[in-house]
Image: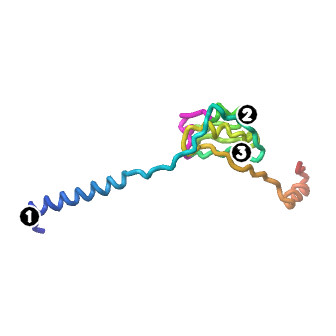
């Protein structure tokens, strides 16, 4: 391939300019929608039987032992830390008050309130347990 110096520098500068424009376009972050920020002073934890906390440990700062705000705020001890994993929520102890979600410092929240699902064993399963001599109560 035979190319003059002048042509070489012109092509180099052109490709460098294109690369800079491509990178600058990629670095422009999309504008995030405004987040709903709640007042922390006037929050009242109200237990709800139909809600339970759910952990999203991919966002949780406690995974690397950096945050304990939800565990400290939970009056019922329903939230436990598992180092390297995040938090675990005991659904039997959770009252659904939402205090943990409210104090979570990350956006989007690492703990969210969701509808409580109640597991009821099927009639067939209860019948099988009764046949085996196991009480369903």
Judged from the image, the secondary structure of the residue bearing numbered disc 2 is: loop
Q: Is residue 86 placed above or below 118 in the rendered structure?
A: above
Residue 20 at what x, y percent from top left? 27, 54
Which dot marks residue 52? 3
| Distance of label 3 from label 2 (alpha carbons) | 13 Å
Task: State which region is magenta.
Answer: 58-69
**Whole-number angstrom distance, CA of label 3 to CA of label 1:** 72 Å
Sequence-wise, the earlier of marks 1 and 2 is 1
Sequence-first disc among 3 and 2: 3
Q: Is residue 115 above or below residue 65?
A: below
Q: Nearer the viewer, residue 68 or 97?
A: 97
Badge 2 crowding class, 10 Å Cα cut-off, few under 14, some 14 to 19, many 20 or more, is few
Is residue 101 left or right of 35 when viewed as pictured? right
Give the mark, 3 or 1, whose residue is nearer the N terminus: 1
Q: Quadrant of residue 90?
A: top right
Q: State the residue at coordinates (71%, 37%).
A: 78
Check disc 3 and report its element: helix, strand or loop: strand
Identify the residue at horizontal 89%, vertical 48% (top origin): 137
Q: Which residue is pictured at 73% across the width and 46% down the height?
A: 51
| Magenta-span inclusion, residue 63 | yes
Q: Please name the residue that numbered disc 1 is placed on.
A: 4
Foreground: disc 3 or disc 1: 3
> Label 3 crowding class (10 Å Cα cut-off): few <14, some 14-19, many 20+?
many
Q: Nearer the viewer, residue 8 or 130?
A: 8
**27 left or right of 104?**
left
Other-residue count near label 1 (Cα within 10 Å), few / some / many at <14 / 14–19 / ≥20: few
- Circle 1 sits in a helix, a strand or a loop, which is it? loop
Residue at the disc numbered 2 = 76
Residue 102 colored magenta? no
Q: Residue 83 at x, y = what percent? A: 58, 37
Q: Position of residue 19 (x, y in %)?
A: 27, 57
């Amino acid at each position: 391939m035979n190319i003059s110096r002048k042509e070489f520098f012109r092509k180099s500068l052109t490709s460098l300019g294109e690369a800079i424009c491509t990178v600058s376009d990629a670095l422009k972050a999309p504008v995030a929608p405004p987040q709903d920020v709640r007042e922390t002073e006037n929050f009242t934890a109200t237990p709800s039987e139909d809600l339970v906390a759910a952990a999203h440990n991919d966002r949780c700062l406690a995974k690397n032992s950096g945050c304990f705000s939800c565990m400290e705020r939970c009056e019922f001890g329903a939230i436990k830390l598992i180092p390297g994993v995040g938090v675990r929520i005991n659904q039997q102890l959770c009252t659904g008050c939402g205090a943990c979600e409210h104090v979570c410092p990350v956006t989007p929240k690492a703990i969210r309130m969701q509808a409580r699902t109640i597991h009821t064993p099927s009639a067939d399963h209860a019948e099988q347990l009764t046949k085996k001599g196991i009480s369903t109560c």
